[in-house]
Image: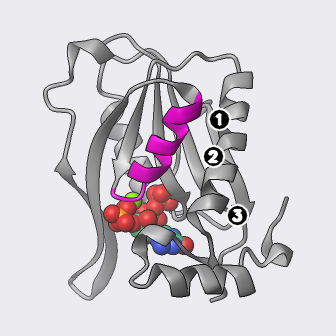
Amino acid sequence: MEKVWYTYDDIHRVLRGLALKIQQDGVKYDAMVAIGGGGFIPARILRCFLDIPVYAVTTAYYDSETCGKTADEVRKVQWLDPLPDTLVGRNILVVDEVDDSRVTLEFVLKELKKEPFNTIGVAVLHEKIKPKKGKLPEGLPYYSGITLGDAWINYPWDADDIDEHNRLAASVGWAADKHID
Ligand code: G4P
Ligand code: MG
């Protein structure tokens, strides 16, 4: 699989554009719900532009093998339980770093749909254009910062050596030819 590297600065710029799309869409979001770990830093940067508070849920994703069959499983590590009163009846924007298989997004959206929110929207930094295992609810407001094919994205917050990461970002970078838009 091809690999791409993004620096914190690249991500900050993409999120500025994503915030503009969200603001131009007409729904006024009251709060973000970041899906941790990957959604935390994007949500914090989006807050600079959207100026709404960030709440958090954390999930863990793994392949489990039962009876020789591999299944994708998501479980809650931490949740909005009980739901804070400040979120009742509000418009919330769920934030994650990547829309990949949609398994995590489907799980989180299904769980959040049980709560008394008004509108729920989703914003992701990267949207991978590929067949999806998970499904999003019909008519869900959806925003992505950047679309790309099925490459592996190296995020700066996962870097062991951030200087080496930035060097790779400078030499390989976004691999512009892999981007769809
Ligand atoms: P989705 O619903 O948002 O499409 O996510 P999916 O369940 O397919 O993702 C499973 C895990 O794989 C997620 O991590 C996601 O962040 C990670 N992932 C998918 N594609 C990439 C990629 O190109 N680069 C990187 N670095 N990670 C990718 P997770 O279990 O939620 O962990 P984390 O958010 O705590 O890191
Ligand atoms: Mg994640």
Please rate how many residues cluster around mark 2, counting C-alpha atoms within 10 Å: few if below 14, some from 14 to 19, many from 20. many
Q: Which image quadrant for residue 26?
A: top right
Identify the amino acid type marked 2: Leu
Q: Is residue 119 above or below residue 157?
A: above
Q: Residue at x 38, y 83 (%)?
A: 160
State the quadrant of the C terminus.
Answer: bottom right
Identify the amino acid type marked 1: Ala
Q: Which mark is residue 129?
A: 3
Q: Is residue 52 above or below residue 140?
A: above
Q: Residue at x 51, y 24 (%)?
A: 51
Report the predominant secondary structure element of the magenta stretch: helix
**Which residue is the site of mark 1?**
19
User: Sequence-wise, which precedes: disc 1 or disc 3?
Assistant: 1
**Which residue is the site of mark 2?**
15
Q: Secondary structure beneath disc 2? A: helix
Q: Residue at x 59, y 79 (%)?
A: 166
Q: Is residue 42 magenta?
A: yes
Q: CA distance from mark 1 to mark 3?
A: 21 Å
What's drawn in magenta, residue-wise? 37-49
Please rate how many residues cluster around mark 3, counting C-alpha atoms within 10 Å: few if below 14, some from 14 to 19, many from 20. some
Q: In terms of depth relative to the viewer, which is nearer, 151 or 12?
A: 12
Q: Residue at x 56, y 41 (%)?
A: 123
Marks 2 and 1: CB-CB under 8 Å? yes
